[in-house]
Amino acid sequence: AMLSPAERSSIDPFVLSEPWRRLIQQAQGSGRKLRSTIDGVDDGPLKQQLVAIADQLDHGLQEAWEIAKRGDDLDETIRHLDPTRLRSKLDTLRTEAGGAPSTDTATAIASVEQQLATAERLRQRSAATADSLRATQTRLDELVARASEVRVGMSDTDTYARDVDDLVIKLEALHQALEE
């Protein structure tokens, strides 16, 4: 399904924190470069194919946007959990418990440790997601550069379209993995 111009314009990187904002801004910049390259192609079958490919890449940009929003949500959850405060609370509980913690203190220590473990798992997921999005951004930049080769006839559009589809599929898979 093709995105309407309203759906494309709904991407607002400024509602995100770093690194998500920068990643989406870079992806949007790559999309603009691709459209600029296509604008230089004379009307005809090649331009039509490139426009269809760019539309597919816009779908990928929408997926990247959804991934970035989810990554930003992970970071907000981590901030809300406040691992620094939890570590301080854990230190306090351990100090209070001394060498012989009561059952209640031991339960509290275990609870805070589980909260810290949750925050760490979320941090790792956020970092892995950001790394994956950075890797797809690098691939996107490569595909934008290759559009120039297609434009001047040094590369075929079918291979290029397949490579764009592969990138979009990876973005869709990453988005789906985050949703699950």
Image: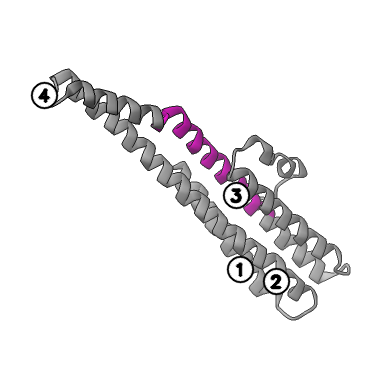
Q: Which residue is mark 4?
A: 100
9 lies above or below 54: above
Label 4 sits on a secondary structure element that is: loop
Q: Which residue is mark 3?
A: 64
Residue 68 is one of the magenta-drawn residues: yes
Image mark for residue 163: 1
Circles 2 and 1: CB atoms closer than 8 Å: yes
Q: Which residues are magenta?
A: 58-83
Between circles 3 and 4, the one closer to the viewer is: 4
Using residue 159 as the reference point, say whether residue 77 is left or right of it. left
Label 3 is placed on what type of residue? Ala
The quarter in which the C terminus is drawn is top left
Among the two numbered marks 4 and 2 on one chain, the one whose residue lies closer to the N terminus: 4
Label 1 is placed on what type of residue? Asp
Among the two numbered marks 3 and 4 on one chain, the one whose residue lies closer to the N terminus: 3
Q: CA distance from mark 3 to mark 4?
A: 51 Å
Image mark for residue 44: none
Between circles 1 and 4, the one closer to the viewer is: 4
Q: Foreground: 71 or 107? A: 107
168 lies above or below 12: below
Q: Foreground: 164 or 20? A: 20
